[in-house]
Image (spheres, rainbow, N blue to C red):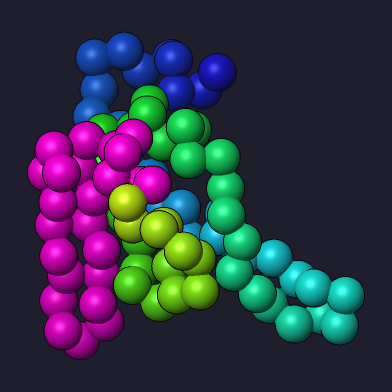
Amino acid sequence: DLLNQFPNSLIGGSIQGCLRQWNAEGKVTPCEMDWSLLQKLDIVFISVDDIIGIENALDNILAFAKHVVVTQGKNGATIYKDD
């Protein structure tokens, strides 16, 4: 609902925390999210480290997000625009 309050704005979001969970042993492990939630964002920011272990994560993100910035630490970033 919050995203609907800014109809004429450029909306970006980092989904880093949405792709991790704790398992029964308390270890942080990757998990998938409801990718369709990204369709209301204009720009999605994610680290290449965040999508390790999630099959087809980047393809799923690109299917819903208009622009995606995948940061790569000291190596910069890759920017995707409309696939």
The residue that appears at 88% across and 75% down in the rendered structure is: 24
Using the rendered image of the protein, determine whether residue 25 is visible from the camera's viewpoint.
yes
Residue closer to the observer: 60 or 19: 60
x%, y% of residue 37?
Answer: 49, 33
Task: Indicate whether 80 appears above or below 9.
Answer: below
Q: Which residues are magenta?
A: 60-83
x%, y% of residue 28?
Answer: 68, 77
Kindly give the residue lying farthest to the right in the view shown. Answer: 24
Kindly give the residue lying farthest to the bottom in the view shown. Answer: 74
Q: Is residue 29 left or right of residue 23?
A: left
Residue closer to the observer: 4 or 70: 70
Using the rendered image of the protein, determine whether residue 44 is visible from the camera's viewpoint.
no
x%, y% of residue 42?
Answer: 26, 33
Task: Indicate whether 39 appears above or below 22.
Answer: above
Residue 61 colored magenta? yes
Which quadrant is home to the N terminus? top right
The residue that appears at 23% across and 29% down in the rendered structure is: 10
Which quadrant is home to the C terminus? top left
Kindly give the residue lying farthest to the front in the view shown. Answer: 55
Occupied quadrant, residue 49: bottom left
Occupied quadrant, residue 74: bottom left
The residue that appears at 46% across and 64% down in the rendered structure is: 55
Instruction: Give the number of marks.
Output: 0
The residue that appears at 46% across and 53% down in the rendered structure is: 15
Residue 28 colored magenta? no
Occupied quadrant, residue 77: bottom left
Task: Indicate whether 73 appears above or below 77.
Answer: below
Residue closer to the observer: 10 or 45: 45
